[in-house]
Image: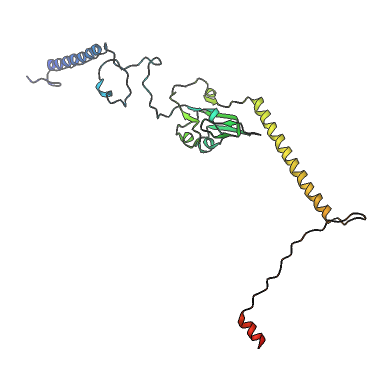
Amino acid sequence: MTKGANNTYFGNIREGFSSLMKGLFLTLKHFVDARFRRKPIPVFDKDYFKYDKGIVTLEYPHEAIPVPDNGRYRLHNEIDDCIVCDLCAKICPVNCIEIDVIKSTEEIGKTSDGTTKRLYAARFDIDMAKCCYCGLCTTVCPTECLTMTKTYDYSEYDIRNMVYHFSDLTPAQAEEKKKLFEEQQKQKAKVEVDKNKGNVEDSALKDKPATEGEVKKPVFKPVIKPVIPKKSPDQDQDKKE
């Protein structure tokens, strides 16, 4: 009698029982191996495929697989090193970075690499709900203050909490800095107007005719002497003849 399915009634039962026992034996083997805990290592580790036995489930968030250093996760801006150049906002393909710039009336300070800071960031917001994690903003940053951290588990119930604020100025401070710059610009404009007005008055005084008892100062005018061409010896000989 030939063994196998669809041949005999008892042959099918015997094959089914054998398959069931093999499956149970494999399950029991994994159950025994799971009693030994293995060290959690990342997939890029050279010994990753050697650890094929033991517990593979991690007790997150108490345990986590190591994150690679070049991973693209949540953005962070070190505002003390930011010169508010606006390059990151311009290159962002999804417009997730919003910046409001206020010009300073004087030098604010220097970054960690020695770059001079002359602009305030009234607002520096990054909406991580819009971010596509392309990393272009970190590439164009001249002071390397904008980086991608290893934090990847920052889900929120409210999507408005996905907007991160990095400005170091309060709204009142930002308004004060803005007013100081506007006052400085007004003073510069006033000085320029007074200067132009003084130039016009000086020009009018020069053209004004001298009154009785007042000696008008002579105006120096440069005189250009005519160029006399040199005569050649042949021309002098012809003239004598």
Q: Nearer the viewer, residue 61 or 214?
A: 214
x, y percentage for residue 8?
A: 12, 18
Q: Quadrant of residue 165?
A: top right
Q: In the displayed structure, does residue 67 sit left or right of residue 108? A: left
Residue depicted at x 62% and y 33%: 107
x, y percentage for residue 26?
A: 21, 15
Query: Furthest-right residue in view?
Result: 212
Q: Nearer the viewer, residue 227 or 60?
A: 227
Q: Nearer the viewer, residue 83 or 166?
A: 83
Q: Is residue 19 above or below residue 201?
A: above
From the image, which quarter does the N terminus lie in? Answer: top left
Q: Is residue 117 above or below residue 195?
A: above
x, y percentage for residue 167?
A: 58, 27
Q: In the displayed structure, does residue 228 sit left or right of residue 201? A: left
Q: Quadrant of residue 97?
A: top right
- Residue 128 seen in this snapshot: no
Q: In the displayed structure, does residue 79 sit left or right of residue 65? A: right
From the image, which quarter does the C terminus lie in? Answer: bottom right
Query: Furthest-left residue in view?
Result: 1
Q: Is residue 41 above or below residue 108?
A: above
Residue depicted at x 16% and y 15%: 18
x, y percentage for residue 148?
A: 46, 29
